[in-house]
Image (cartoon, helix red, strand yellow):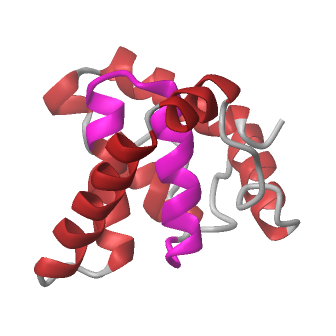
Amino acid sequence: MRGFPSFQEGKGISRHHAIFTESIKEGKMTRGKLPEHYEVIKRENKKFFSALERLGKVAREEGPLDEKTVQLIQLAAAVAIRSEGAVHSHARRALAAGAEVGEIRHSITVLATTIGFPTVAAALNWINDLSE
């Protein structure tokens, strides 16, 4: 597709894609602190968050999907509900689970026909925010 960045490393990489890729190589994407408001809510609701974390763990372990696939699915869900924080979180988690940058970008881009290009464009911008 003309004018659309390639999902393969080194082929038609946009400026943002190059920045995103470099930040991953430097380890910037896997580091990072949770948002302060999240930490406050978690601290004030320890029992709830403990149960929520156990539920997430059980849901991931009960099925046949590997962690990378689970994180890419959760990333797509975060994009669909326009949750920038969740997009950041699941992009980082997908990377930690072994996803390549192209896989992350592609998992967002394929949503265009389902959720619309403006939402996809916003999400692609949000993952670029992580590297700037």
Given residues 80 and 51, the one toward you in this image is 51
Based on the picture, tell me whether residue 86 belongs to the magenta stretch. yes
Residues shaded magenta: 77-99
Based on the picture, tell me whether residue 13 belongs to the magenta stretch. no
Given residues 62 and 118, the one toward you in this image is 62
Q: Where, by quadrant of the figure, is residue 109 drawn?
A: top left
Q: Where, by quadrant of the figure, is residue 125 drawn?
A: top right
Q: Where, by quadrant of the figure, is residue 46 drawn?
A: top left
Residue at image point 61% right, 28% down = 40
Asked if 1 appears above or below 96 in the picture, the reply is above
Asked if one can make out residue 8 in the rendered structure from this viewpoint, the answer is no
* Residue 82 x %, y %: 36, 21
Looking at the image, the residue that sits furthest to the top is 118
* Residue 90 x %, y %: 47, 51
Placement of the C terminus among the 4 image quadrants: top right
Magenta stretch, main secondary structure class: helix
Apparent side of residue 23 relative to residue 65 in the rendered image (left or right): right
Asked if one can make out residue 82 in the rendered structure from this viewpoint, the answer is yes
Residue at image point 35% right, 76% down = 67
* Residue 34 x %, y %: 66, 41
* Residue 119 x %, y %: 36, 20
Placement of the N terminus among the 4 image quadrants: top left
Looking at the image, the residue that sits furthest to the right is 26
Apparent side of residue 15 relative to residue 62 in the rendered image (left or right): right
